[in-house]
Image (spheres, rainbow, N blue to C red):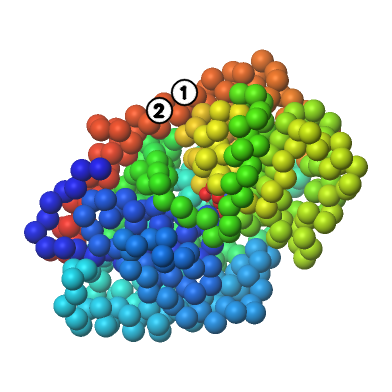
Amino acid sequence: MEKLGFERRQRVVLVPFPFQGHITPMLQLGSIFHSKGFSITIAQTKFNSPNPSNYPEFTFLPLSDNLDNYDTSFCNMLNVISFVNTNCEGPFEDYMVQMLGEEDVQGEVACIVYDPIMNFVNVVANKLNLPTIVLKTTPATYMQSQVVMFQLLEEKLIPLPESQLQVSIPQIHPLRFKDLPLPATDKIPQDVLDFTQSYMDIKSSSAIIWNTANTLDHYPLQQLQQHFRVPIFPIGPFHKLAPNLTTSLMEEDNGCLSWLDKQAPNSVIYVSFGSLAIIDENALLEIARGLAKSEQPFLWVVRPSLLNGSNAMDFLPEDFKERTRERGCIVKWVPQRKVLAHPAVGGFFSHCGWNSTLESICEGVPLICMPFFTDQMVIARYMNYVWKVGVELENVLESGIEKGIRTLMVSEEGKVMRKRAFEMKLELEQCINGGGSSYESLDQLVEFIVSLAG
Ligand code: UDX
């Protein structure tokens, strides 16, 4: 990647929210900035810290978080967020004061880029008069749906009856009430609303960086540019600009790649629900039965924390393992980008987290969508209805899962989706290549950051 020359070395401080789906894009952004000539400092909670020795080009500042022995599962996420914000503000301020007070070979601080869940960053930056930029790790469409959701709440159109869930919302067509990031039939708890509002607020930040591309998010980006009065830089998909960076917090099982080598092209359905989703025992069994009945080869990531409270592997029935021994590979965690790039993988049965989605379409792999929460519902709808690269499940029982797998892997409809996914892969390549929208936007972003430092 071409470096834009600037006279003095400048440092960008990055502050990720410490969960896989948020750490990954922040590390990738660090690598992208580094390739442009910035020095990179990552202020990272001790909890879920990536191993600094894997990133010799970055400087790490460990933030004490007191999260040892704390319940960090998704069910307790709002408390985790509040805890992290309370505990990390002091240590972060101390580091920044020290950094500003010393001459350092890493250069002067040009700005702090932070995940908007890490509110404390803005407080410290304001005190020290440092510019900040927000990194959005979810699609612009999601943010747009949040904006509209608050309008609907204000107009008292939510909560609404179950019968309305399939109705489309005119301001954000083709999203339906059932695709909204928070359940439209329930009264949404105040703490959830407060958090969502705070997550949407960029406070005094000077700009927004988005891990998306114009070809995916053009209209919502245009709308949001009117909503936020600061520049927006859609420079993604990040992982294609930082292709060799490892970002996994869990150990990757590379054995699955040798297993894939033995499978026919486009024959394997890859199954994974990211790093946070939790299912119950019944859902686990329905998925197992659906996979067994589909008769397709599969690679299934069963993370130990997938089942609330117990190791999911222990709950897989022996007869399922026996029946699928020849055509199934079950592991705890895989090198997902390599898996999706493998010629044997023909489909991805996914929760539609934004990283997984970008990784899949960048390899031309179509999906079966089983969204769990927040942005995943919005993404699933776009996959199915707008981009036409995702199968929407009729139900999440064995019958729906079997049908979904067959539709994607062996039907004419599935073939059309694979072709469309390949076209999207090419469109995304164009965005990041010379002259493409993300490429241009990245150059503008670098100039913008240099201008912040004065
Ligand atoms: C979270 C949210 O749930 C998601 O909706 C949001 O868009 C981002 O933050 P997560 O659930 O973990 O993320 O999903 P996702 O965004 O897909 O990120 C998972 C990451 O883990 C991907 O980069 C994927 O490559 C990686 N992964 C997953 C592995 O490396 N190995 C695996 O076995 C599974």
Comparing 79 with 345, the one in front is 345
Give percent across and percent down for residue 296: 75, 28
State the SS at label 2: helix
User: Would you say the beta carbon of the disc 1 residue lies within 8 angstroms of ligand 1?
Assistant: no
Asked whether disc 2 touches disc 1, contact meaning CB atoms under 8 Å apart, the reply is: yes
- Residue 310, by quadrant, is bottom right
Residue neighbourhood size for the residue with mark 1, other residues' Cα within 10 Å, grouped as few (<14), some (14–19), many (≥20): some
Left or right of residue 9: residue 213 = right
Residue at the spot of label 2: 427
In the rendered view, does 355 fall on the left or right side of 161? left
Q: Nearer the viewer, residue 377 or 445?
A: 445
Amino acid identity at mark 1:
Glu
Q: Which mark is residue 423?
A: 1
Along the line of sight, the residue nearer the viewer: 261 or 46:
261
Residue at 84% x, 46% y: name it. 285
Residue drawn 63% across and 34% down? 260
Report if residue 125 is visible in the image: yes
Residue 221: percent from left, percent from top: 39, 42
Rendered location of residue 284, percent (x, y):
80, 48
With respect to residue 210, does 14 lie above or below? below
